Amino acid sequence: MNIRKLRLQDYPAADAMMRELHRLHASQRPDLFVQEASPYSREEFAAMVEDASRICLLAEEEGKAIGLCFLSIREPKGILLQKIAHIDDIFVVKEARRQGVAKKLYEEAEGQARATGAWSIHLKVWAFNEPALAFYRSLGMKVRSYDLEKEL
């Protein structure tokens, strides 16, 4: 398996993976998400890949895209004292799960975040995604805050 920086020409594979991730979210929260949608347009994807404050990674096996990770580096400003890294998305295709792909993506993202001088790494996990929560806890992550909602 190889982990490398995402490139503009990776959009079709990245879009397919992001659509699959979006379908999971939409199936669990149809009240919030459009059922069939592409989370990032080609233009948004290009902007992300070219943005110096982002780390965009692709995992591939024998030339086939099997996972990705999007990470944002947030500089200290205003009331924020520390530079932090935020995982926006991490995803592995179904047939490559439970083979260490997500762990390798996470470790690469963490290493690159550390190299920027980031103080910590954060992410958001939906409450329905218990396998992801268990995975992140296995990496040493812990709950930092709770994101609550009340339907009106």
Image (tube, helix red, strand yellow):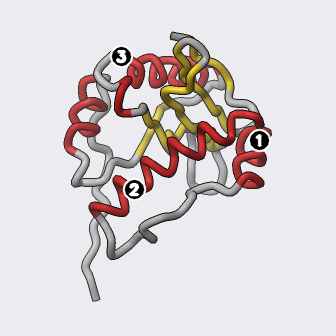
Q: Secondary structure at mark 2?
A: helix
The alpha-carbon separation of the residues under discs 3 and 2 comes to 23 Å
Q: Amino acid at mark 1?
A: Asp
* Nearer-N-terminus badge (3/2): 2
In what quadrant of the picture does the C terminus appear? Answer: bottom left
Position of 39 compared to 50: left or right?
A: left
* Nearer-N-terminus badge (2/1): 2
Q: Residue 63 location in percent, x, y?
A: 61, 17
**Are the two marked residues, 1 and 3, in contact with CB atoms closer than 8 angstroms?**
no
Q: Amino acid at mark 2?
A: Arg
Q: In front here: 67 or 110?
A: 67
Q: Which residue is at 58% across, 17% downward? A: 3
The alpha-carbon separation of the residues under discs 2 and 1 comes to 26 Å
Q: Amino acid at mark 3?
A: Gly
> Which disc, if any, is residue 100?
3
Q: Residue 80 location in percent, x, y?
A: 56, 49
Q: In front here: 79 or 152?
A: 152
Q: Secondary structure at mark 3?
A: loop
Q: Which residue is at 56% across, 22% downward? A: 64
Judging by the rendered image, the residue that carries numbered circle 2 is 23
Q: Residue 143 location in percent, x, y?
A: 27, 42
Q: Which residue is at 60% across, 28% downward? A: 57
Judging by the rendered image, the residue that carries numbered circle 1 is 51
Q: In front here: 23 or 135?
A: 23
**Are the two marked residues, 2 and 1, in contact with CB atoms closer than 8 angstroms?**
no
Question: Looking at the picture, does residue 126 appear above or below residue 89?
Answer: below
Using the rendered view, name the quadrant where residue 93 is placed. top left
Closer to the eye: label 3 or 2: 2
Position of 152 compared to 20: left or right?
A: left
Position of 132 compared to 57: left or right?
A: left
Q: Residue 124 location in percent, x, y?
A: 39, 48
